[in-house]
């Protein structure tokens, strides 16, 4: 009973995600609008429409971990970097790779500037990034001059917005390749699990129960097989999925298995204790916000490729998507608690919510009300579970 | 007394938290007009019992019955118990610093009507109650401007203003100095002579012995015994035996000193306050510490002891620090805390909850935090298996009582948190350990364990600098004691010549001279 409870509370968001998916599936089917979950088209869209949220939420999580600090300027950094990419590639014909480098450096530099203000001059993050939100969008619109820049060349778009295999392939070939890739990923994952278990046993460390390992293998392999084969029925594996997987894996490893990653959690849990443990808390804050700038630039590159334009409206509300994904994914509004995996689930959750509601044809304003309520519920859940722990 | 009907009876109280039984069939009764002390180790269930009584855990959240004044009470909140005249004064004072004494006293119990507070009545009444508790201040003074001792009196006056009949004090003297503590105890005795009933929760057994009419001992959530003055032996030793379930003959474990060469030397160390620039917190301090030695620093609150320790520990406190540090004969200066830790110095803070532990993190994370590179494979990556093994090892070695290393630190009792904090700093493998009030607010058994750890450390040739306000502790543990007052080192005594009176005399003498 206790075990079941702790399993439920640990995986609450994951279970919530599945419930919401099934709920929408039921509603959509019963209203005769086809299927959402089983449709390869919708699945592909889910990934391409929400890729930027995953990227931004990953960066936002690091900021939130340092002590509940948020970055409101991410949407404005996205539009500014998009505008720069548009001017360089489309207007001036600069090499695509050089442009990407310049864009990433610009994002990082903006991040570093805000990080400097926050970490070393101790300007509150809320104020710094609120100002940044205005400043960078303003600069971007000055550059764009109220006009979108498009179209982008194919050799740029193929980097972020293409499919494996390339366009024009035979549908049967796409299906077979997707299936093969799914098997490769699953075998790799299972191999890694077994390998780490064996090496643990050899060193004499305690290992988890074989059942929980099997359960994990079955669930993850199942999800991978399902998603890949569905995608194979449409246009193949989106290249964006590869980028997202890389980002999520790198940052998961960073937060869970490295010393600086551990420091982020420590300072969010108790900044003074962290400092007295020899942790340079200013440097950690500087890092978190600089990194946010970098990932905002990555998100900008992805958005430009998807819209095939640097538009004047891109980035509006992105900060809220990212912050919402983190909180829905279990990050604490006070810092110190939260995982990259959780933020990803939060992003998917919001994506599914959006997609489900628009397939249902709900009024846009009603969609807002529902999204806001879900976010609020997630934070209330966090606060309540914490206060219950304190009472005990 | 004795024969009369008790004012309060708590019968077969059981309170279960997920995973633990905090109270197990506790029976407890208080006679009218007595001072009834509740003693027990941390985690014995004292606070839980009082929370049941005050309605913080409402009726239904526990099993058993509360019979007060002859009738069974089913409180659904603190308001209900207050209506009956039961008031609790918590260890952490619940006053608003930027409000006046008078405003605080009637907070939640305002004079006048909802739309108009009657200020003259508020302050006149406040003055009356302040007189009762012997608080000689204007009721319009801000609470932040009076000392802790006086704040405690404000809390009591606040309870009196609610027509209290049963006054519960949770560790009222924990943060008071000797004089304020005595005044408070005398006040309690006076209330008693006026017919008030009180419950006193305290770790300070000498105070319990001094004022209590009966003493109930709790251990592991159960009532062990109730000792009645005049009928039973209520000496300290007897109470301790009930609390820990065994006799502790010596409060301080014996140790043979084996003192080596000087390891840390501090010369002409001057530190200024970080906010009030120009205020000297340490003034030309000269101290040294030898291998295998426990050196104490005695002094009143605000003498600058913590500030001295922290400024040495990688300049973690103060500005314009001047002076010289020598480590094993070599001149050294610490740029930051990390460099102090790397030089094998550890500072164990006095405030384990706010400055010491990450309460929301697990035992494992807390244990390794100050020296993560010891768990790393390559330079930056953590080997979690190795980390778990270390955490298990240190948990066992320092006797931290918890079901697992994945337990969160906030679920531990005070004594266990302190042990975890020590384990955390021992994980940095220090040669010099600065302990700041390492036994404050923890129970006798845990204290004894910590003294043993200190002795073990110096037996290995390491050095300990012990800051403590508990004089018997300094006298019992230290080879040498520095006496600090108002930022100056005003005396130094060897174990053989040190005693409580001599130390107080030095402090008072230096205060007069200044």
Image (cartoon, coloured by chain):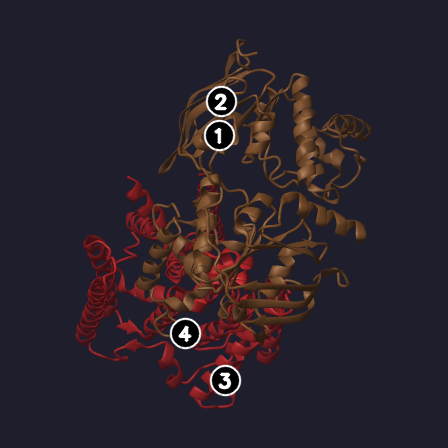
Q: Is residue B310 above or below residue A366?
A: below
Quarter in which the N terminus of chain B is drawn: top right
Q: Tag 4: Cα neighbours inside 10 Å, few (<14), some, or many (≥20)?
A: some
SS category of the residue bearing label 4 = helix
Q: Are marks 1 and 2 in contact (CB under 8 Å)?
A: yes
Residue B204, position as x, y percentages in the image: 56, 35
Left or right of residue B333, residue A8 in this image: left
Q: Is residue A139 visible?
A: yes
Residue at figure coordinates x 37%, y 46% from the top left: B402
Q: Are marks 4 and 3 in contact (CB under 8 Å)?
A: no
What number of labels is visible?
4
Quarter in which the C terminus of chain B is drawn: bottom right
Residue A240, position as x, y percentages in the image: 35, 73
Left or right of residue A261, residue B157 in this image: right
Q: Which residue is mark 4?
A: A306
Tell me, what hue is chain A? red
Q: Tag 3: Cα neighbours inside 10 Å, few (<14), some, or many (≥20)?
A: some
Give the letter of the chain under mark 4. Answer: A
Seen from the viewer's position, the closer of residues A357 and A158 is A158
Seen from the viewer's position, the closer of residues A336 and B405 is B405
Mark 4 or mark 3: name the one nearer the start of the chain.
3
Marks 2 and 4, how far apart in space?
79 Å
Q: Which residue is mark 2?
A: B227
């Amino acid at each position: 009973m206790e075990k079941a409870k702790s399993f439920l509370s640990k995986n609450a968001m994951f279970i919530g995600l599945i419930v919401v998916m099934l709920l929408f599936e039921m509603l959509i089917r019963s209203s005769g609008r086809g299927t959402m979950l089983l449709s390869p088209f919708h699945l592909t869209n889910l990934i391409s429409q929400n890729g930027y949220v995953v990227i931004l939420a990953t960066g936002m999580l690091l900021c939130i971990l340092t002590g509940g600090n948020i970055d409101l300027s991410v949407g404005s950094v996205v539009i500014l970097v998009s505008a720069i990419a548009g001017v360089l590639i489309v207007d001036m014909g600069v090499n695509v790779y050089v442009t990407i480098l310049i864009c990433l450096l610009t994002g990082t530099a903006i991040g570093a500037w805000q990080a400097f203000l926050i970490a070393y001059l101790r300007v509150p993050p809320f104020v710094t990034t609120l100002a940044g939100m205005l400043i960078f969008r303003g600069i971007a619109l000055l550059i764009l001059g109220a006009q979108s820049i498009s179209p982008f060349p194919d050799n740029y778009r193929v980097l972020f917005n293409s499919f494996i295999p390339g366009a024009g392939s035979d549908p049967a070939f796409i299906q077979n390749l997707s299936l093969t890739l799914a098997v490769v990923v699953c075998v790799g994952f299972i191999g890694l699990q077994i390998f780490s278990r064996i090496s643990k046993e050899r060193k004499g460390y305690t290992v988890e129960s074989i059942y929980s390992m099997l359960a994990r293998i079955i669930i993850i392999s199942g999800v991978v097989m399902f998603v890949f084969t569905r995608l194979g029925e449409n246009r193949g594996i989106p290249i964006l999925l590869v980028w997202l997987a890389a980002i999520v894996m790198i940052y998961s490893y960073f937060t869970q298995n490295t010393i600086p990653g551990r420091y982020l959690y420590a300072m969010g849990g108790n900044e003074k204790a962290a400092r007295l443990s020899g942790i340079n808390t200013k440097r950690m804050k500087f890092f978190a916000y600089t990194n946010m700038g970098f990932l905002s630039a990555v998100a900008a590159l992805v958005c430009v490729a998807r819209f095939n334009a640097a538009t004047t409206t891109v980035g509006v509300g992105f900060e809220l998507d990212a912050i919402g994904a983190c909180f829905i994914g279990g990050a604490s509004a006070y810092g110190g608690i939260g995982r990259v995996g959780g933020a990803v689930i939060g992003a998917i959750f919001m994506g599914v919510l959006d997609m489900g509601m628009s397939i249902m044809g709900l009024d846009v304003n009603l969609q807002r009300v529902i999204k806001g309520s879900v976010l609020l519920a997630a934070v209330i859940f966090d606060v309540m579970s914490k206060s219950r722990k304190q009472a005990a | 007394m004795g024969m009369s009907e008790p004012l309060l009876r708590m019968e077969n109280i059981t309170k279960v938290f997920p995973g633990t039984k905090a109270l197990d069939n506790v029976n407890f009764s208080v006679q009218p007009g007595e001072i009834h002390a509740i003693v027990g180790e941390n985690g014995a269930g004292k606070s839980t019992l009082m929370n049941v009584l005050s309605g913080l855990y409402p009726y239904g959240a526990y099993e058993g019955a509360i019979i007060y004044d002859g009738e069974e009470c089913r409180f659904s909140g603190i308001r209900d118990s207050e209506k009956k005249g039961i008031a609790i004064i918590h260890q952490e004072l619940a006053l608003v610093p930027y409000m006046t004494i008078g405003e605080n006293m009637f907070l939640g119990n305002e004079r006048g009507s909802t739309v108009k507070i009657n200020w003259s009545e508020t302050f006149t009444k406040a003055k009356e109650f302040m007189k009762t508790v012997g608080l000689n201040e204007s009721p319009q003074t801000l609470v932040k401007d009076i000392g802790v001792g006086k704040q405690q009196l404000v809390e009591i006056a606040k309870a009196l203003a609610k027509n209290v009949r049963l006054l519960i004090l949770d560790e009222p003297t924990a943060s008071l100095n000797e004089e304020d503590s005595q005044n408070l105890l005398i006040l309690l005795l006076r209330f008693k002579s006026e017919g008030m009933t009180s419950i006193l929760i305290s770790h300070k057994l000498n105070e319990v012995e001094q004022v209590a009419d009966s003493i109930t001992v709790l251990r592991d959530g159960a009532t062990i015994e109730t000792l009645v003055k005049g009928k039973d032996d209520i000496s300290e030793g007897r109470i301790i035996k009930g609390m820990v379930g065994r006799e502790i003959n010596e409060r301080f474990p014996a140790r043979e000193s084996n003192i080596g060469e000087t390891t840390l030397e501090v010369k002409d160390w001057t530190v200024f306050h970080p906010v009030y620039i120009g205020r000297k917190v340490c003034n030309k301090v000269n101290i040294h510490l030898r291998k295998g030695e426990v050196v104490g620093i005695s002094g009143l609150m605000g003498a600058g002891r913590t500030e001295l320790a922290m400024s040495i520990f990688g300049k973690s406190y103060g500005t314009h620090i001047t002076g010289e540090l020598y480590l094993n004969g070599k001149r050294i200066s610490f740029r930051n805390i990390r460099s102090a830790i790397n030089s094998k110095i550890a500072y164990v803070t006095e405030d384990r909850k706010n400055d010491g532990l990450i309460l929301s993190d697990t035992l494992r994370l807390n244990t390794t935090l100050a020296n993560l590179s010891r768990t790393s494979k390559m330079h930056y990556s953590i080997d979690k298996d190795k980390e778990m093994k270390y955490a298990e090892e240190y948990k066992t070695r320092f006797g931290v009582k918890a079901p697992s290393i994945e337990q969160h630190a906030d679920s531990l009792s005070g004594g266990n948190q302190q042990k975890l904090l020590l384990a955390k700093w021992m994980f940095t493998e220090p040669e010099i350990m600065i302990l700041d009030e390492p036994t404050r607010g923890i129970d006798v058994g845990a204290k004894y364990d910590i003294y043993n750890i200190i002795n073990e450390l110096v037996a290995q040739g390491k050095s300990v600098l012990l800051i403590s306000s508990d004089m018997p502790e300094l006298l019992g543990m230290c080879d040498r004691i520095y006496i600090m007052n108002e930022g100056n080192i005003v005396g130094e005594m060897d174990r053989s010549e040190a005693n409580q009176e001599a130390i107080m005399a030095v402090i008072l003498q230096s205060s007069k001279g200044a």
